[in-house]
Image (spheres, grey):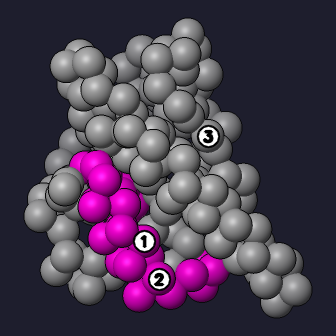
Amino acid sequence: MGFIHVYTGEGKGKSSSALGMTARMLGHGGMVYFVQFFKFENSDKQFLEQEERVVFRQFRFPGDYFKDYTDEERRALAEKLRAFLSTIEAEASEGFDLIVLDELVYAVHMKLISTEELVSLLKRLAEHAEVIITGRNMPPDLLKEAAYVTELINVKHPFMQGIPARRGIDY
């Protein structure tokens, strides 16, 4: 049985922290299931699309957190997300030691799934493996269930001064 880990906060580095845990698990011979949700083009996905992806299973769920979806589009996206999460649950229980759900919390903010559905999913996944979820504004009920909660804050970051993300450092 595993624990639920949360990386949250306004600071940069939530996904990078999850990638660090991924590297640690892989370094110990573990298997990792890594899924990214609602990521931008210039994000960590560029790292994941390199040769490292052959070492662990990585998927991406399309969607735009900032898009103003119509009710019909939101219903269709919610249905697609639930089917995707069912697939993840079935596949992730097949011997993976770490399951990373990067930015999945945005599905709650977008009202695609409820907090209760998300917490229930995380608890079921933690029956098989360690589970990491990242994103801002984690629901309090999720924080209560997590064994590890790390909040990242922005103290100083070049991005705040208009310097774009740098390859190998920020992505």
**Could you tell me which quadrant the N terminus lies in?**
bottom left
Give the residue at x 46% y 17%: 55
Q: Is residue 105 above or below residue 141?
A: above
- Label 1, on which residue? 121
Span shown in magenta: 109-138
Are discs 3 and 2 less than 8 Å apart at CB? no
- Label 2, on which residue? 117
Quick check: is 124 in the magenta stretch? yes
Say which amino acid is labelled 2: Glu
Give the residue at x 61% y 40%: 59
In which quadrant of the rendered view does residue 29 lie? Answer: top left
Say which amino acid is labelled 3: Phe
Say which amino acid is labelled 1: Leu
Outermost top residue: 51
Give the crowd class for mark 1: few <14, some 14-19, many >=20 residues within 10 Å: some
Give the residue at x 51% y 79%: 108
Q: Secondary structure at mark 3?
A: strand
Are discs 1 and 3 less than 8 Å apart at CB? no
Are discs 1 and 2 less than 8 Å apart at CB? yes
Give the crowd class for mark 2: few <14, some 14-19, many >=20 residues within 10 Å: few
**Residue 168 at what x, y percent from top left?**
42, 15
Distance from Cα at disc 1 to Cα at disc 2: 6 Å
In which quadrant of the rendered view does residue 169 lie? Answer: top left
Quick check: is 62 in the magenta stretch? no
Give the crowd class for mark 3: few <14, some 14-19, many >=20 residues within 10 Å: some
- Label 3, on which residue? 59
